[in-house]
Image (cartoon, grey):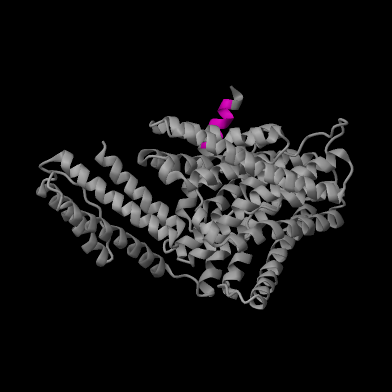
Amino acid sequence: MAKIELFIALLTAVVLLAALARRLPVPHPIVLVLGGLGLGFVPGAPNIRLDPNVVFFVFLPPLVYAAGFLSSSEELQANARSVFLLATGLVLMTMAGIAVVAHELTGISWGAAFVLGAVLGPTDPIAATAVAGRLGAPQRLSTILQGEALVNDGTGLAVFKIAVGVTLAGSFSLASSVGEFFKISAGGIAVGLGVAFITGRVRRRIDEPELEVTTSLITAYAAYLVADRLGLSGVLASVAAGLYVSRSASELLGPATRIESYSFWEVTTFILESLLFLLVGLEFPTLVSDLEGLSAGTLVGYAAALTGAAILLRFAWMFTVPYLTSFIDERRGRGRSRLSSRERAVLGWSGMRGGVSLAAALSIPLATATGASFPDRPLVILLAYTTVIGTLVPTGLTLPFLIQKLGLARPEAARARNLEARRRLVEAALARASELEDEEELPERAVERAREIYDLRLRRLRTRLGAEEDGDGQEDPDAYRRVRREMLRAERGELSKLRRERKVPGELAREIERDLDYEESRLTG
């Protein structure tokens, strides 16, 4: 019963802190991480010791699956090289750099240092993309941040799996570790795609949103568990499964299911990440008590050094590797659009760590195969948590100022892009209505009433207001609904064309598709 009461108390704290965050001009992860830290020092707060297996198998699969499902595969493909370099090269460089700093500064073993580096390799884009979207920063920045975080979750945690295994075994071989990395990565991706394909075939035969959403949750865990039992990367399996479902969502899922699926995974991600922040905050005093002779000042110094290392390594990458790749492209005669120095500065300042890093840190085994305690586990978790705070809070609070100072805040451009995409869809629907007028079996009045709604919407879009109307009062409901469905189908076709031509950002395309889903759901009751 005590665990149930704790769970309810944590959910209540999540609601209160998130509500507070909405009243403040800061992303909610910042309020949650600080709130979690504060809860740990409240008199009478429970002493928490989380089971590593529970953290790894309960939290990680849905978190990484949701990251894949809620992403835009079209935009990932458009920025594939930038995302790949950040999610592999930068992760490995960050892991090595943090491991060196941690080992030399704190004296922890090399095994524990590399585990810490792998934990802090993945980034969390929530705070950065929220700020960028609110200020109207170039969409490409959000796309790269989301794609980087999606792929580096798999890369970082695949390396984490190897680092933990090496530490438990007490021996290291570079050749075998590299081979193991490629094996568990490629194998994990293959398993994830296979599981998603199989469950997708099942979902095509289901037309109940509740059952399909439940099946998606099964897909996340099944992909993870199958890959893990085979010794492969469960994280990459769940990511690949999420990406597969995301890419085929328009054909695989019905309108009502898409609405419920997106809402379910957005809420699930929010709850799980929020609980992780609070749970680590509650465990913080317990971890501190496990360390003897480590003062608060020393811990703050360690955290500052590791935070500085993570930020400096990211900036070093942003202002060297892009120039190198551009030089190579020019030598090969391939012209590519390159991020400006201002955009790279924003990307460099957006390397926040979050829920995935916390989950990985908490999943470090308690003991080695011989029964000995995992070396420096409490200190590694503490350093991971304090570095998450160090990379999240200061950068998240100052990112809006940086974007504005660099002249990248363009909210009017984002609004114009939104209106233009919606205008294209409405015009496509009206063109389809003109074709339907020539079909004798459709009553003219049904087509006219549908056109009235879209004409009104188009006029309001042209005046930059936007509008939605309902089709109440039609004389022939069945014919009217048929006309509206045909027009909605035309809008979907135009939206797909815009996505293929990469003329509409992934987030905006998803928002528009959700609006179309709501309209079609209203037509079907």
Vertical relation: 341 (above or below) 230: below
Q: Quadrant of the N terminus?
A: top right
Magenta: main secondary structure equals helix
Tell which of 113 and 484 is nearer to you. 484
Vertical relation: 479 (above or below) 436: above
Vertical relation: 78 (above or below) 437: below
* Residue at screen point 42% across, 61% down: 504
Tell which of 446 and 274 is nearer to you. 446
* Residue at screen point 47% across, 70% down: 409
Q: How many marks can you see?
A: 0
Tell me, yes or no, if residue 497 can be seen here.
yes
Residue 8 in the magenta stretch? The answer is yes
Locate residue 451, reporting x and y percent.
Answer: 17, 54
Locate residue 408, reporting x and y percent.
Answer: 50, 72
* Residue at screen point 59% across, 45% down: 239
The quadrant where residue 88 appears:
bottom right
Locate residue 44, reporting x and y percent.
Answer: 64, 34
Tell which of 75 and 312 is nearer to you. 75
Tell which of 95 and 280 is nearer to you. 95
Tell me, yes or no, if residue 379 can be seen here.
no
Residue 150 in the magenta stretch? The answer is no
The quadrant where residue 283 appears:
top right
269 left or right of 263? right
55 left or right of 264? right
Q: Residue furthest top?
A: 1
State which region is magenta: 4-11
The quadrant where residue 102 appears:
bottom right
* Residue at screen point 80% across, 39% down: 290
Vertical relation: 206 (above or below) 330: above
36 left or right of 369? left
Locate residue 389, reporting x and y percent.
Answer: 65, 53
Q: Quadrant of the C terminus?
A: top left
